[in-house]
Image (spheres, rainbow, N blue to C red):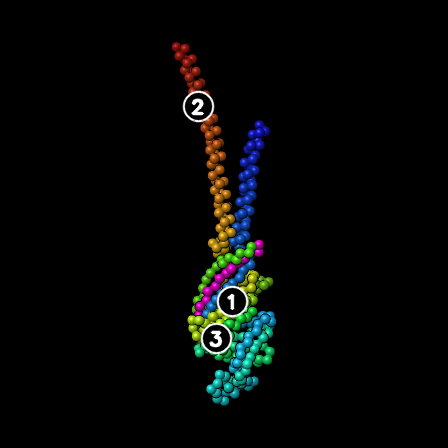
């Protein structure tokens, strides 16, 4: 009897271990699907007519060369002629200088492109430049510079209201995630942004949405002389993308969900396969156990039938003898 108890206990222990492993695998799948332990990065490539930049840190340096600077007048003279130069002389004083800008932390610039391909910077909070000063970088000079890079926060384009010139023309984005214990980075979401929308990369701090720090660049567009190409990459964290559009009361938030991760993560797919395999094996083993019990039951039934038949034969034999 003791040996029988031990033999019955071993399969029970295996089943118990199997259930525990299945639960652990399921917990791992759920955790991975909801991004626990993952660091996220947004990558956006866009073609725009304008963007707003707020610089972070002290590593933003732009050597622009010879540019035209329009310095706002303290008191605009609306009766004066506009003049034929770059600056409206009713509102600005015009000067030409060789300019290198080391952007101060939290300084900002509105970057636009004119129809002839000249780059226009409107500057705020930058030492030695009056707020609202406009810098014109000629197209030829910009093409020689090729790339202007920055670290800070950025808004690409503006919602397409009437008269808006800083439009986003086209954009696509990727969401990449990396597990803390893995060296592999996976692209888990891809998408595009419509013309006339506005894009910002955000993050939440203490529950409140704030502009995320991005690493970016602007360069003359290869496809249009009156546009520029922009690339931004968010710092690693829990970033999301805010998309504003004309007529919208609040920005639409774009971030990956558990469906995106489940469909794109090889690790989740592998764990799901193992879990399915384990469940299938358990279902395969269960009928074998049921079949064994059924065989024992059938054997008992057959024994009872044979016993019943023997009793009937004996009764019939006794009746025959009495006759």
Report x, y in % for residue 98: 55, 81
Q: Which mark is residue 232?
A: 1
Report x, y in % for residue 83: 48, 87
Q: Gap between marks 1 and 2, in whole Å?
A: 83 Å
The residue to which callout 2 is attached is 305
Choose mark 3 or mark 1, whichever is in front: 3
Choose mark 3 or mark 2, whichever is in front: 3
Q: Gap between marks 3 and 2, in whole Å?
A: 100 Å
Which residue is farthest bottom? 80
Q: Are marks 3 and 1 in contact (CB under 8 Å)?
A: no
Q: Which mark is residue 143?
A: 3
Report x, y in % for residue 93: 53, 85
- Mark 2 nearby-residue class (10 Å; few <14, some 14–19, many ≥20): few
Q: Residue at x 54, y 41 (%)?
A: 18
Q: Secondary structure at mark 3?
A: helix
Q: Is residue 169 magenta?
A: yes
Q: Secondary structure at mark 2?
A: helix
Q: Secondary structure at mark 1?
A: strand
Q: Is residue 263 magenta?
A: no
The answer to whether one can see residue 323 in this image is yes
Sequence-wise first label, 1 or 2: 1
Q: With respect to residue 220, does 260 lie above or below? A: above
Q: Gap between marks 3 and 1, in whole Å?
A: 20 Å
Q: Which mark is residue 306?
A: none
**Residue 150 is drawn in which quadrant?**
bottom right
Give the quadrant of the N terminus: top right
**Residue 116 is drawn in which quadrant?**
bottom left
Q: Main secondary structure of the magenta part?
A: strand
Q: With respect to residue 168, does 85 lie above or below? A: below
Sequence-wise first label, 3 or 1: 3
**What segment carries the magenta color?**
166-181
Choose mark 1 or mark 2, whichever is in front: 1
């Amino acid at each position: 009897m003791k040996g029988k108890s031990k033999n019955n206990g071993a399969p029970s222990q295996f089943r118990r271990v199997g259930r525990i492993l299945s639960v652990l695998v399921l917990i791992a799948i759920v955790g991975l699907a909801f991004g626990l332990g993952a660091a996220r990065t947004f990558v956006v490539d866009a073609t725009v007519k304008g963007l707003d930049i707020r610089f972070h840190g002290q590593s933003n340096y732009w050597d622009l060369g010879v540019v035209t600077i329009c310095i706002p007048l303290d008191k605009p003279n609306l009766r004066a002629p506009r003049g034929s130069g770059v600056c409206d002389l009713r509102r600005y004083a015009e000067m030409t200088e060789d300019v290198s800008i080391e952007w101060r932390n939290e300084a900002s610039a509105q970057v636009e492109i004119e129809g002839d391909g000249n780059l226009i910077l409107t500057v705020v909070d930058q030492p030695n430049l009056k707020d609202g000063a406009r810098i014109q970088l000629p197209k030829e000079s910009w093409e020689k510079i090729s790339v202007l890079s920055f670290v800070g926060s950025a808004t690409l384009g503006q919602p397409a209201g009437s008269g808006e010139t800083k439009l986003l023309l086209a954009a696509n984005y990727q969401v990449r995630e990396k597990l803390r214990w893995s060296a592999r980075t996976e692209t888990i979401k891809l998408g595009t942004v419509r013309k006339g929308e506005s894009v910002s990369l955000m993050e939440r701090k203490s529950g409140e949405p704030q502009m995320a720090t991005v690493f970016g660049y602007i360069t003359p567009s290869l496809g249009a002389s009156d546009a520029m190409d922009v690339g931004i990459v968010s710092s690693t964290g829990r970033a999301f993308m805010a998309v504003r559009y004309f007529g919208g009361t609040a920005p639409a938030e774009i971030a990956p969900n558990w469906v995106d991760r489940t469909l794109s993560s090889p690790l989740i797919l592998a764990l799901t396969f193992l879990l399915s395999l384990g469940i299938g094996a358990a279902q395969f083993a269960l009928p074998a156990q049921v079949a064994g019990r059924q065989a024992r039951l059938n054997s008992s039934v057959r024994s009872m039938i044979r016993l019943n038949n023997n009793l009937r034969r004996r009764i019939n034999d006794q009746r025959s003898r009495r006759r």
